[in-house]
Image (cartoon, rainbow, N blue to C red):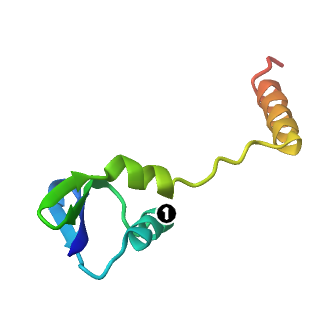
Amino acid sequence: MQYFVVMIDYGRRGREAIVDPEVTRREVISRVASGEYRNISFIHEIADCSVEDVTAEILDEAALPVIGTTAADLQASQFDHVRDLRKHERV
């Protein structure tokens, strides 16, 4: 039997361990990526009689791709910067 334990930290309100033998690795990854699981303390994979910490692996697999800024975003940013400089000019 194989299952995952996801420990979620709620800060002052405590912690919660989510254990569901029917949840697969793929489903844990999708829940992390969707934001359903937040503030994760650790994720353990329990298979037979062994426990393995797979937190880093699952978080890496669930990471959303980084989308670079476009030229339009950079140009808008520069216009905003120039406008801010004008607001602070002495009259």
Left or right of 64, for residue 7: left
The quadrant of the image that shows the C terminus is top right
> Residue at position x 16%, y 67% from top?
48
Q: Residue furthest front?
A: 48
Residue 28 in the image: x percent, y percent? Answer: 38, 68
Left or right of 14, for residue 73: right
Please tell me whether residue 19 is drawn above or below residue 57 in the rendered image: below
Amino acid type of the residue that numbered disc 1 sits on in the rendered structure: Ala
Q: Is residue 14 visible?
A: no
Q: Residue furthest bottom?
A: 22
> Residue at position x 79%, y 17% from top?
90
Q: Is residue 66 visible?
A: yes
Residue 58 in the image: x percent, y percent? Answer: 40, 55
Q: Nearer the viewer, residue 9 or 62?
A: 62
Q: Quadrant of residue 82?
A: top right
* Mark 1: few/some/many CA within 10 Å (<14, 14-19, 20+): some
Q: Nearer the viewer, residue 86 or 12?
A: 12
The quadrant of the image that shows the N terminus is bottom left
Q: Which residue is mark 1?
A: 33
Q: Quadrant of residue 27?
A: bottom left
Residue 25 in the image: x percent, y percent? Answer: 38, 68
> Residue at position x 16%, y 55% from top?
12
Q: Nearer the viewer, residue 62 or 25?
A: 25
Left or right of 39, for residue 7: left
> Residue at position x 41%, y 70% from top?
36
